[in-house]
Amino acid sequence: MKLTGGKPRICVLFCGGTIVMEPDPKTGALDVGGGTETILNLEPRLREAYDLNVIFIDNIDSSNMTMGHWDRLVKTISENYEKYDGFVITHGTNTMGYTSSALSFALRGIGKPVVLTGAQIPANKLESDARQNFVNAVKLAAMDISGVYVVFGSRIMLGCRAKKDNEYDLNAFKTFNGKDVGEIGIKIQMNGKYARRHERKLEAKPGFESNLAVITMEPGISGEMFNSLVEAGIQGFVLRAFGAGDMPHWLISFLDEAHKRKIPVVVTTQCPNGVTRMNLNLVGKHALETGVIQAFDMSMESMTTKLHWLLAHRTPYEKIKGMMETDMCGEVAPQNKDDEENG
């Protein structure tokens, strides 16, 4: 389902990141460096097999990535959708999982691959992983798949499940609460469930509500903080609770108030590989009665960007819970909700 019989046309969306960073002359710390020419020169032979075009989005450390950048990526892909067979996004590692999750929700029904990649070591270093990651991302963007993916090291991950796991290893990302959809060895091998290319209409829906609070529970946390945020007009909460979603009993009254004010509250666990199942303990059951939303097996990146996106599109409060707990692009295992209801 290529556009033409010639070379696959791949659009590279340039966002900067470590892949093009250079050491500061004074401090030696990595900072924003090379531009789009660095990307194109990573492997000149790619042009023999692919028609590559670069569109500049920004050149930043991805810690500075904003929702405005997400919107620009969505709009750029939408505006150029018919021109290319696939898209590659070069991105810093720090927030790559957030961007890949955000795009997974905003690019509804996409029938082509969007592949994010970057590097642990800048491209100007002899030992850099930049070339391998970029080459594999371009190759994946030309394959018979669709959806948003992250390619890093030897792994191919769904964008809505990718999480940075390591600052040192060249396999810096992992699939959160799941298996990789593919692996890179002598060749690229797709192993898990993935969607094929299709010609159905892309429904690009940019827009993310920024007024969201993510709070980590810890012993002795004050209720005044929650009340202050509500009075300040916060639009939604994500609570990183204990265990399977447990929290102090006193917080139930706050959850009741949030429900009355139609402020969605998503509850997840602080356990690194945990799954939120709030029917295990009494306080969790009481919290469920207030209408909180369980994150189940979603990553922090996925649950936050999904709530940002739903709020921005004025999803009625009464529907947000069902939509947050329903799988849209592989971010939450459907059986988790069924198990909870039958538990």
Image: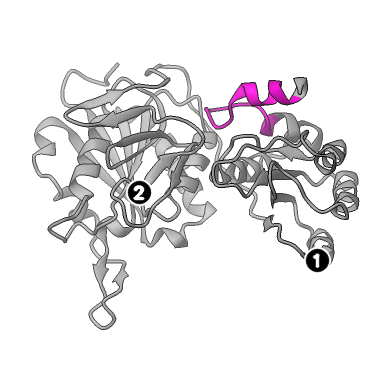
For label 1, the residue is: 222
Mark number, residue 27: none
Is 222 on the left or on the right of 331, as rendered? right
Query: Tag 2's secondary structure?
Result: loop
Q: Amino acid at mark 1?
A: Ser
Q: Position of residue 255 (x, y in %)?
A: 85, 48
Vertical comparison of 74 with 222: above or below: above
The residue at the point 41 percent across, 23 percent down is 111
Q: Position of residue 236 (x, y in %)?
A: 73, 49
Where does the magenta region start and end?
323-340
For label 2, the residue is: 172
The residue at the point 26 percent across, 77 percent down is 28
Foreground of the two, 244 or 158: 244
Is 33 on the left or on the right of 95, as rendered? left
Q: Amino acid at mark 2?
A: Ala
Is 105 on the left or on the right of 128, as rendered? right
Vertical comparison of 338 with 122: above or below: above
Q: Position of residue 154 (x, y in %)?
A: 27, 37
**Was residue 334 drawn as part of the magenta stretch in this picture?**
yes
